[in-house]
Image (cartoon, rainbow, N blue to C red):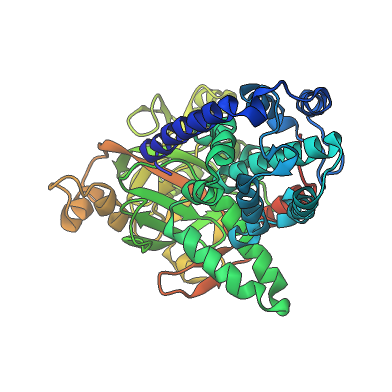
Amino acid sequence: MRIASLLTWLTLGATLASSARAQSASSPSTSAPPSTRIETSLREAARTGTLPGLRWPRFPDYRDELAEVYGAHQWRPLWTANGHPTPAARAAIDVLKAADNRALHPEDYDAAELDRRFAELSSESVAEQEVAWFDAALSVALLRHLSDVHVGRVNPRSLAVGINIAPKQLALASLVLDAAGTGRARELVQALEPKFVQYRNLLATYARYRAFPDSARRTRQLELAIERIRWLPLLDDGPFIVVNVPGFQLYGFDSIGGAGAPSLEMNVVVGKAGAGRATPLFEDRMEYIVFRPYWAVPPGIMQSEILPAVRRDASYLARNNMELFQGDGDFGTPVPATAANLARVASGTLGIRQRPGPRNALGPAKFIFPNDHNVYLHGTPAQELFSRARRDFSHGCVRLEDPAALAVWVLRDSTQWSRAQVEATMHAERSRKVNLARHLPVVIYYTTAVVRPTGAVEFYDDVYGHDARLERALAKGYPFGS
């Protein structure tokens, strides 16, 4: 959800909840002090972050929010009045019962048990401890569900995925109070769902596959794909790039709110699986392009491959159009390949780079979004690799089938960069750095299920084993690694 629309919703929700609480406080049925037993039970659940009887009784991640919810309500029940459930409780339970419509699981939110207890509390008087349990359990379930819908169940950072969901965190206590005060739990959940067209397409496909028992594996892939959609960062209305690693594809989208069809698409080569070369998953912003780049050999490749080759063969550097340098990899100063300078390369005070040209490992351009992984997008002279179905051959960077097309797409705000102008710059005598007028979001992503704009679904192999790791994390249940 865009930040502005989310803030509008939260402001409206806070106003409605405040009004509802004010009306509740002035009514005879709730103006009396809360039952000591109910208050004690609610405080104990908030203090311990535990509620026996839930499928997943521990909720340390929501303990503070539960205290905030009931503290704002003077530790009175939120979902019951005079020992009986409210219409808002019915609406909230119905949302939880329909969690599978969002590729989540009603049993994770104790929906059936809450439904049973709703009927019990509606038809007869029960002990105050039972009232307190129902109330706290419904609040915990809704806290969990709201968060799960918006940012996913598993924090991607716990799986070494460099996507930060913190900017998307919600004022969950205010939202629960809103749902209890207005009875609009369904509308609230809908407002928090991802706005990507791919999300809606995946949900529709997930519903179809669930209808066929022999599709369990594919259904699971779709569920994992939907989980990862929820991780995606808040994006502006401008263009952004997604690289799907197991699909070996790059997509350029004009905006988050578009029709879902990418305006640019191309094959890519990614890091080799099972060789310590896997392309890392993260988000960042592209800042500039270098045309006719040098390839500055990364430290790992330097120590494991290049230096041993140079020591074995004195002609290696010349044959591969390489040189020693100091300073910046693209614009630094060449230095002689003496024994003393090679020793400085080994110690890390000098580097080795490959000069621009048709055999340069980076091809005619590289696209930089500075990151700790030293990963970027670039061309390649090895064009034959793009005809293969499985394309994990690199040391970790992402090789582009058509870097000129990406450059034109990235630089399209400028009238200077036609395809002909881009290609001319790629084949000029000197390297050239071009800063982007507007930094461009890039997400190095992983999903083994994609729904095309035509409605066709494509499934990919779990080349890095990330699906298996996410499945194991989800199988642990709440609190998912805490």
Establish if 389 lies above or below 368: below
Asked if residue 306 can be seen in this view, the reply is: no
Q: Residue 269: x and y, percent?
A: 50, 58
Quarter of the figure with the C terminus: top right
Residue drawn 53% across and 26% down?
Answer: 22
Q: Is residue 456 above or below residue 223?
A: below
Q: Which residue does the image show at 45% across and 48% down from the upper left?
A: 320
Q: Quadrant of residue 287?
A: top left
Tell me if I can see residue 132 in this picture: yes
Q: In x, y percent, where is residue 261?
A: 36, 64
Residue occupying image coordinates x 30% and y 45%: 238
Q: Residue furthest front?
A: 28
Q: Is residue 23 left or right of residue 72?
A: left
Which x, y percent locates residue 470?
Answer: 70, 51
The percent position of residue 88, horizontal first and vertical second, equals: 60, 45
Write the residue at 66% across / 31% down: 29
The quarter of the picture where residue 215 lies is bottom right
Residue 302 appears in which quarter of the rendering? top right
Q: How many marks?
A: 0
* Residue nearest the viewer, comparing 178 with 271: 178
Up-down: is 178 above or below 48?
Answer: below
- Quadrant into which the N terminus falls: top left
Q: Is residue 375 left or right of 359 when viewed as pictured?
A: right
Camera-nearest residue between 71 and 195: 71
